[in-house]
Amino acid sequence: MKHYKIFLFVCFLGITCMSFGQTKRDFSFYKYTNFEAGYSYNFGEPNNKNFHLLSVGFNKTSYGGMHGAGYAYGIASDVALNTPNFTIGPKINGFIYYQFFVIGSELALYTDFKETTLRYIPIFGIGGERGKLTINPQVILTNKNFEPIDRGAIQLTINFCLDKRPRNDKKE
């Protein structure tokens, strides 16, 4: 038990030292234009198989401050990699970030060009302006009989900055 306490104490000191290693922090707010790339592991009902989806898109992000807060909105498209038929899902999305928490939603239209289904996807996870790891349950809004992918997903998304500008909210 004593070694366990010493190990925790050393870890605490190490994390504390690494946390204060910055000489100057930038608390400014910035506007980003990002290219986003993501991978989604799709699981749950009704299919007996789990699916893999690739997501690509663009988003606008406003992020900064002492505690790291902001929002993002954008467009993207999912491409299913291992479904029986070629399936894509164009979507629009919006997110709110605070510290390392992410909440948001997407509206996706999945189609295999024979049938289509519209899905609302609430999003919960961790991340920031550069990337996020989220859990995405899906609510089927139309055509409940067409289920080309499962109803739940875990998604990892990385944002590649195309443009970064200071956010100027001052009115003169």
Image (cartoon, rainbow, N blue to C red):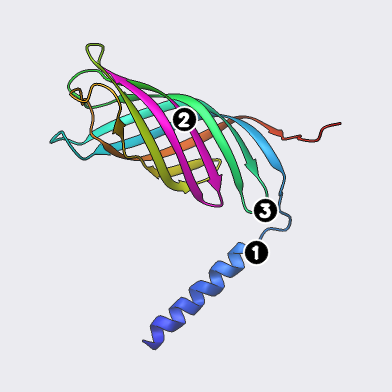
Tell whether label 2 touches label 1 (CB within 8 Å): no
Amino acid type shown at disc 2: Asn
The reply to whether discs 2 and 3 touch (Cβ–Cβ < 8 Å) is: no
Rendered position, 93 above or below 87: below
Identified at 66% across, 33% down, the residue is: 31
Closer to the eye: label 1 or 3: 3
Residue 33 belongs to magenta span? no
Choose between 143 and 54: the one closer to the eye: 143
Disc 1 from disc 2: Cα separation: 35 Å
The residue tagged 2 is 93
Residue at position x 48%, y 45% in the image: 102
- The first of marks 2 and 3 along the sequence is 3
According to the picture, the residue beneath numbered tag 1 turns out to be 20
Q: Position of residue 72 (x, y in %)?
A: 55, 34
Residue 116 placement (x, y as % from top left): 27, 17
The boundaries of the magenta stretch are 92-111
Q: Amino acid at mark 1?
A: Phe
To which residue does mark 3 refer?
66
Label 2 packing within 10 angstroms: few (<14), some (14-19), many (20+): some
Viewer-closest of 171 and 136: 171
Residue 123 placed where, x, y %? Answer: 41, 40
